[in-house]
Image (cartoon, grey):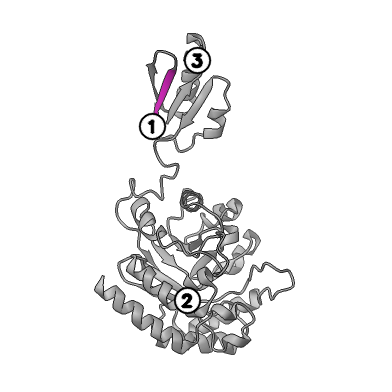
Amino acid sequence: MIIVLKRGTSRETIDKFSTALKKNYDVTVNEWQGVNETVLGLIGDTVSIDIDYINAQDIVYSVKRVQEPYKKANRKFHPEDTVITLSNGAKIGDGSLSILAGPCSVESQQQVTEIAKAVKDFGATVLRGGAFKPRTSPYAFQGLKAEGLEYLKRAREETGLPIVTEIMSETDIDLFSDVDIIQVGARNMQNFSLLKRLGKLDKPILLKRGLSATIEEWLMSAEYIMAEGNQQVILCERGIRTYEKFTRNTLDLSAIPVIKKLSHLPIIIDPSHATGQSWLVEPMAMAAVAAGADGLIIEVHNDPPHALCDGAQSLTPEEFHRVVDKVRKIKSVI
C-alpha cells in the first residue's frame, strides 16, 4: 500500500502516524522524502487495512493498494486450482466439464423427478432446482420452500445426482443441511451476514455474480466465505446489467480467463439467466466452454411454455441433450 502525505506535514506527525500504522496493522512502514511530499510504503498483510479510513486522515493526500484486497481467493497465494469434490465423488474444477441442470423452480415431485431422470440420461452431473425463489415482483411464484427441498432430495434418491439450490436467508440454513451445494443468488452476493454464516459450513457454496458487481467485488464476496473457514467456493457468472435490453443480462465471457488468472476457484457459466432466451443458451454455452469454463448451469423444463418460472429461457430435455453433446465435443478439442 502506498500512502502519499500532504505537503507541509510535520516530522512529529509523520512519525506518530507511522507508529500507529505499525502498531495497529503489524506492517513495516518505509518512508521516502520527495522535494514537496512524503510517501509511505506499507509492506506486509495489508488486506485488513480499511483504505477509506486511511484516506480520511487529515494528513493523507492519496492512498493506493498495490496488492489485491482478497488473499484466500487469490491465485498468488494458492497457485494450484481448487477442486470441489461432491458427495457422490463428482468433481468441479478438475479439468472435466461439470453440467448442472434442472428446472428454475421446483413445482411438484413428479415434475422435478421426471426432469432429474432426463437430464441425468443426457449428461448432467448435478441437479439444480429452486425451492426458494427470489422474484422481482412480490406477486410472482416464490417457490415451494421447504416442501420443494424435500422434492429435490427425493429426486436425488431416485437418480443419485447431487443437488444445488438457492438459499435466501441465513435463518433457513438448518433447512439446507442435507443439500449438496448451496447457491447464493446474484441479489445476495453482498449479503455479508449470510456469506459469513455459510463460511462456517463444510459444504460447497455456488456464488453467483451480482447484477452490477465488478470482478473484484465478486472475489471479495468469495473472500467473506473463505475467511470464515470454508474454502469450497464455486464462482458462477450469470450475466451483468448493462444498457442492452435485448437479452436479460449481458454475459461476460471475459470473466472466465480473468478469474482463471486472478483466482484458483472454479468458475461455471449460467447461459440461461444471462440471456433469458432458450435459443441463445446453446451458442453461449459453447462459447463459455471454449473460453475455459469449468462447467455450466442450465435450466431444463419438461414443459417450458407452462413453467411457473422462467419458461422462456428453459430448454426441453431434448434440446439440453443437443447442447451437452456439442459442448462436450468442444471440451474434447480444447
Task: Verify CB contact (< 8 Å) between mark 1 and mark 3.
Answer: no
Q: Position of residue 240 (x, y in %)?
A: 52, 60
Label 1 to label 2, Cα distance in Å? 47 Å
Q: Can residue 193 be seen in this view?
A: yes
Image: 83 above or below 301:
above
Task: Verify CB contact (< 8 Å) between mark 1 and mark 2.
Answer: no
Q: What stretch is highlighted in magenta?
A: 38-43
Q: Is residue 90 visible?
A: no
The residue closer to the viewer here, 146 or 214, is 214
Q: Where is residue 15 in the image (x, y as percent from the top left)?
A: 47, 14
Q: What element carries label 2?
A: helix
Image: 193 above or below 168:
above
Where is the N terminus found, in terms of image quarters? top left
Residue at x 38% of width, y 48% of height: 74
Residue at x 58% of width, y 21% of height: 58
> Of all residues shown, which one is farthest toward the top?
11
Residue type at tag 2: Leu
Label 3 to label 2, Cα distance in Å? 57 Å
Residue type at tag 1: Gly
Give whichever of discs 3 and 2 has the lower sequence position. 3
Image: 320 above or below 13:
below
Give whichever of discs 1 and 2 has the lower sequence position. 1
Label 1 to label 3, Cα distance in Å? 26 Å
Q: What element carries label 1?
A: loop
**Would residue 135 appear left or right of 111 to someone viewing this image?**
right
- Which numbered marker is on residue 7? 3
The residue closer to the viewer here, 300 or 228, is 300
Where is the C terminus found, in terms of image quarters? bottom left
Residue at x 37% of width, y 51% of height: 262
Q: Where is residue 324 in the image (x, y as percent from the top left)?
A: 38, 81
